[in-house]
Image (tube, rainbow, N blue to C red):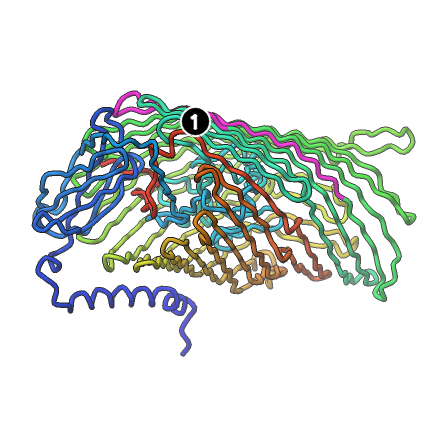
Amino acid sequence: MKMNLTLRIAILLLLPTLLFAQQRDGSRGSRPDSLKRNAPKIGKIFGSLRDSKTNEAVSFAAVAFLSARDSSLVGGVQTNEKGNFLAEELPIGNIIIKASFIGYATTFSKPILLTMQNSEVDAGVIKMAASITNLKDVTITGEKADFVNSIDRKVYNMDKNIVNTGGTVTDVLQNIPSVNVDIDGNVALRGSQNVTILIDGKPSGLLGGDRKAILQQLPAGAVDQIEIITNPSAKFDADGMAGIINIKTKKDKMKGMNGNLSVGVGTNDKYNIGIGGNDRSPRMNLYGNYNYRHETRSITGESTQFNYFPSQSAFYYSTNSHSNNKSDIHVGKLGADFFINKYNTLGLSGSLSARDESRPEQINYQFYTPEGITYDEFYRDITEINDNFNYDLNADYKKTWDSTARELTATASYSSNIRKSDNTFQSSVYSAVSLPYQINYSDNHYQNIIAQTDLVQPIKKSSKLEAGLKSTNRFLDNQLDYSNLNFTTGSYENNQLYSDHFIYKELIPAVYGMFTSKYKKLDFNFGLRAEQTFSTIESETMNETYKNDYLSFFPSAFFKYPLSANSDLQLSYSRRVNRPDSRSLNPFVDYSDSLNIRKGNPFLRPEFTNALELSNSLTVKEWSITTSIFYRKTDDMISRFRTVDPNTGIGVMTTTNFASSENLGGELIVRYTFDKIGSIMGSFNIYRNKINGSNIQSDFQTNATQWSSRLNASLRVAKNTSFQVTGNYMAPMTTVNGEIKGMSGIDVGMKQDIIKGKGSISLNVTDIFNMRRFQYINYGDYYYTEGTRARESRVGMLNFTYKFGKADTMFSKKKNQRPNMQDSGGEMIDY
């Protein structure tokens, strides 16, 4: 009997690494090693390094652990940003800590005794004295790892990204494993578009109520890291069925005054400039950055729809569209961290962004008889002008206690987005059919207020409680005024049928609690979150109000077990929710395209998902292998749904709830580091998506398998020259009433360091073989549609970057930086 899909994926993805880990353990046990090597490695030592004069943390310092008997090396870690370190799996016996960092004298601790009864020891604060070495002529070549696999997330550092320099977040996400971005900027994580996008860990006004808006508004140069969290704990908001994509913007923290400048120019009227820096003293860190980007980019599309209506003769029509979009984007950020004392820190920050966009588009329609004879045609000109302004204000407070991991944090933020749009529609008629000229003006206001407080309370040495309160208040006001041309008077007159005023209000108070502990080798975490949702939809146009209030609970659980010194097995569970967005809920009918009408559904229900994930991380010398299998079960799945009127041939697109969906899949990420010359990372995702839409129509059911893969090679081809190539492929995907065809692309880039490493010149070309085209098929009882859309391809960018200040000699990260120590919520652990 054939094995089911679950078992086959589990064997495919997990068995090789599990066997490899067990073989390493077995071989180690059979060797005639000394008694010292066979000593149980159950010891744990934690502590922190600080400057002996200023008491400031010594970040990214090397911490070695030596056997007091023969000074042999038995372990090693690196301090995190706060100067804290944690070393595990140390052998029983007397251990000496050796701390070293550029600018400080090497420091040794007194012997620390680890025993079976006292296997965890707090080394406390170790003070390091500045050395008398003259650092003026010291050259440091530190580099951050391009990929860090943390306990609850995958972190991709953007300063290692060459191929997307000068681009936008859209370009960046196309090269992130597990993430897919379609031609319209819609983001999918592991095949699901129900993903939460955060900026610096918070919902931002940059999103403007539209999750994909951030992608084309934020320049890649303003981004520091992309975090992928596929199974968030109860500490996070429950939004996002597939997980969270957190876009961390740049916030320089180097000591002294430091800065960077970048300029770039690209093909077909594209250029950008960015500047940023910080000034850090013992009491305060001031930081800021500004990025400007101008872009002209074309988008083309074509489609053909075949109609088979019982009440009329068969016919088909085709469309061809072309737009040449121009945009100017300004993004700035300014902030300060005030170190009130060693226990209290206050942070204030604000960001502004403005985007002006012009999107002229022409769509040509041609109608044919079944024999292919043209019997009607017209074209439609659309001119869209958008003005988008956003600002975010944030205040953060943090309090810690001496010699304990107890921590209290409080956050308050306010986001506002104003988006105004002018649209002109003009139709030229070649037949007797007459279509009016139209214009519309939209004014959209979005506000988001967040207040949150969190407490971390240690319990004994290996346990802690976490709890928090949060309130999220969203408000959206959309005003649309529509006018038609009066051919008699020659003026435009308001059309009340097409005009709309829509207001959406949402208040979500939440509370959560989590318990983290350890039993022997097993680390575990249990959490529970409760969210009360109060939502109100007000259609001023239709004079109707809809309310949907509900209380939901979201449990989570995480387990981690070390199979060996180089391999960990993790199991996680969480419950998530995807609330309908305001656009899907708005009952207004959009007639802007007379052949393709769109309307919302105010009766949409939220979809709830239970997610289970099993993963294994294995590190063997230069190899890093991460394998995962996951399962998601979603009730009341939210999906777009298109029908065609058999009497008129007009298509209607709306959003509805299908009964359920199930998603079973696996992920493999392999990274190999070449000695001194770079790394290569490949990823492979496969999943089977089963959709049950029988509550809408009996045959609306699918059970399809899709897969995607990515490859990223970063190599140092000469002493100061780096080369990077990335490629991705998304296999065809079957939907309830159609298909999305496969899509691929390859990006290349090269960077040359100059001015003794302070500057660099980079050149990159995206989609060098012009293969990224979004092709689709859609069908129903009376129609069949196929089409293609593509953004401008083969875009080349030439960029220059220069770094200045004291960072070169005063404060640098080591090569092969180890992952930061993080808890399940992603915050640094203070020991």
* Residue displayed at 80% across by 50% down: 364
Residue 631 x/y as whole percent: 41, 58
Residue farthest bottom in this picture:
1
| Residue 827 visible, this angle | yes
Crowdedness near tag 1: few (<14), some (14–19) or many (≥20) residues, C-alpha within 10 Å: many
Q: Is residue 764 left or right of residue 362?
A: left
Q: Residue at x 67, y 49 (%)?
A: 792
Q: Nearer the viewer, residue 351 or 438?
A: 351
Q: Which residues are magenta?
A: 333-361
Above or below for 450 versus 186: above
Question: Residue shown at 84%/39% (left/top)?
Answer: 436
Which residue is located at x 15 percent, y 54 percent?
41
- Magenta-span inclusion, residue 801: no
Q: The N terminus is located in which quarter?
A: bottom left
- Is 617 situated left or right of 94 in this image? right
Residue 424: quadrant of the picture: top right
Residue 481 at what x, y percent from top left?
72, 30
Res 193 seen here:
no
Image quadrant of residue 52? top left
Could you tell me which quadrant the C terminus lies in?
top left
Q: Name the residue carrying label 1.
A: 287
Q: Relative to the observer, which residue lies in front, 502 or 704?
A: 704
Q: How many marks?
A: 1
Q: Nearer the viewer, residue 451 or 790?
A: 790
- Tell me the kind of residue under disc 1: Tyr
